[in-house]
């Protein structure tokens, strides 16, 4: 049974979700462009391979970039890092860490995007000089379970954007909630992302993300004497997200499926449906390889993930990441 306060929070978030389309339209009527566009980068290869649907699944360290409430799924400590190879020699990286302290889970994150530009005063073959431009956000997250079925979480972020002629700084916050129902098979998540502002009053790419996920797994065959938590053996997951930018873009919907084979290899496929004037629909593919440590590394769990997101207009994107649980 959910406590009365938890029920009130759920009702409030459901009302916000239902009102989001009209709110989105009202804001966009008078809105211009936003700053710190690198915050739109989707962190993690696993979520990218699922087509960008993760707010309701939210069951590993990747959720620090999607729905901070999902960090309560971290059993002990988890660390991840991702390198995103995309068009125009733009380098995107994410790093996330989370650690449980009794019921509370805290985490730290980094998300950045950088590229090098060339300066010329004339049509020369070699540039007169080069400059690195881009931006990054560092965050501190907290998540806490309000009951057996509901968790809340938030992330406070400091933002720095380095442009060719000026720099900009700002602060932002993510706030999320997740429900885990039907003996944890069903997940429902809602998160508000990038609520904040840059100095000078420039808006950030604030968005509302809502997701649902259904998972199936089997419990470990037998308990053994070990300090390592006995994790459920995942079989498959179906996920779907709605992403509603509130200032600078149109909604998009994301669906994906993940299938684990022999608890070691995962296959993922996802699809994004956008409602922009420019074509933005797209397929995503991903794989994962997971291995539990043995002997001296018996308490460490490794997972490597790869996602491929083809795009005929801006070029193919490749994401490579790892997760370590220890």
Image (spheres, rainbow, N blue to C red):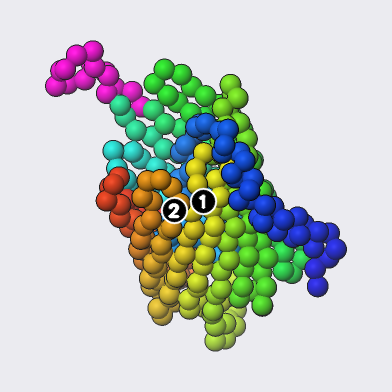
Report the residue at 33% width, 38% height from top.
90
- Splitting the image into 4 quarters, where does residue 322 fall? bottom left
* Quarter of the image that includes the C terminus: bottom right
Which residues make up the magenta segment?
Answer: 118-132
Instruction: Note whether 297 is above or below 52 in the view shown.
Output: below
Residue closest to the eye, 26 or 3: 26
The local crowd at label 2, few if under 14, some if 14 to 19, many if 20 or more residues have their Cα within 10 Å, is some
Kindly identify which numbered label has been placed on residue 274: 2
- Quick one: which residue is furthest to the left in this view? 125
User: Which percent across, then down, holds residue 180?
Assistant: 66, 69
Work out whether residue 105 can be spotted.
no
Count of picture labels: 2
- Quick one: which residue is furthest to the bottom in this view? 221
Q: Which is nearer the N-term, disc 1 or disc 2?
A: 1
Q: Secondary structure at mark 2?
A: strand
Report the residue at 28% width, 38% height from top.
88
Work out whether residue 164 can be spotted.
yes
* Disc 1 to disc 2: CB gap under 8 Å: yes
User: Which percent across, then down, holds residue 26?
Assistant: 62, 41
Q: Seen in the image, is 187 located left or right of residue 131? A: right
Q: Seen in the image, is 202 located left or right of residue 80? A: right
- Splitting the image into 4 quarters, where does residue 75 fall? bottom right
Residue that mark 1 sits on: 251
Q: Secondary structure at mark 1?
A: loop
Q: Seen in the image, is 160 located left or right of residue 49? A: right
Residue closest to the eye, 230 or 154: 154
């Amino acid at each position: 049974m959910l406590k009365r306060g938890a029920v009130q929070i759920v009702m409030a978030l459901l009302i916000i979700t239902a009102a989001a389309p009209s709110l989105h339209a009202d804001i966009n009527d008078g809105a211009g462009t936003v700053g710190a566009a690198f915050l739109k980068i989707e962190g993690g290869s696993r979520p990218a391979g699922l087509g960008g649907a993760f707010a309701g699944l939210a069951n590993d360290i990747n959720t620090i970039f999607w729905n901070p409430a999902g960090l309560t799924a971290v059993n002990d400590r988890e660390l991840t890092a991702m390198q995103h190879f995309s068009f125009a020699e733009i380098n995107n990286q994410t790093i996330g860490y989370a650690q449980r302290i009794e019921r509370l889970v805290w985490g730290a994150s980094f998300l950045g995007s950088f590229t090098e530009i060339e300066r010329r005063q004339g049509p020369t073959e070699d540039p007169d000089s080069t400059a690195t431009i881009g931006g990054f956000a560092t965050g501190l997250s907290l998540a806490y379970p309000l009951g057996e079925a509901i968790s809340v979480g938030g992330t406070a972020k400091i933002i720095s954007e380095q442009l060719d002629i000026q720099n900009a700084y700002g602060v932002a916050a993510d706030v999320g909630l997740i429900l885990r129902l039907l003996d944890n098979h069903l997940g429902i998540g809602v998160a508000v992302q990038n609520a904040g502002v840059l100095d000078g009053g420039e808006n950030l790419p604030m968005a509302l993300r809502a997701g649902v996920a259904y998972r199936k797994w089997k419990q470990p065959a037998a308990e053994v004497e070990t300090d390592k938590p006995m994790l459920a053996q995942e079989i498959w997951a179906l996920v779907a997200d709605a992403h509603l930018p509130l200032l600078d873009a149109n909604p998009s919907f994301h669906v994906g499926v993940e299938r684990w084979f022999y608890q070691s290899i995962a296959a993922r496929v996802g699809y994004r449906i956008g409602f922009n004037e420019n074509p933005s629909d797209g397929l995503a593919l991903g794989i994962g390889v997971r291995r539990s440590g043995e002997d001296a590394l018996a308490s460490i769990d490794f997972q490597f993930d790869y996602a491929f997101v083809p795009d005929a207009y801006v070029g193919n994107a490749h994401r490579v990441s790892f997760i370590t649980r220890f």
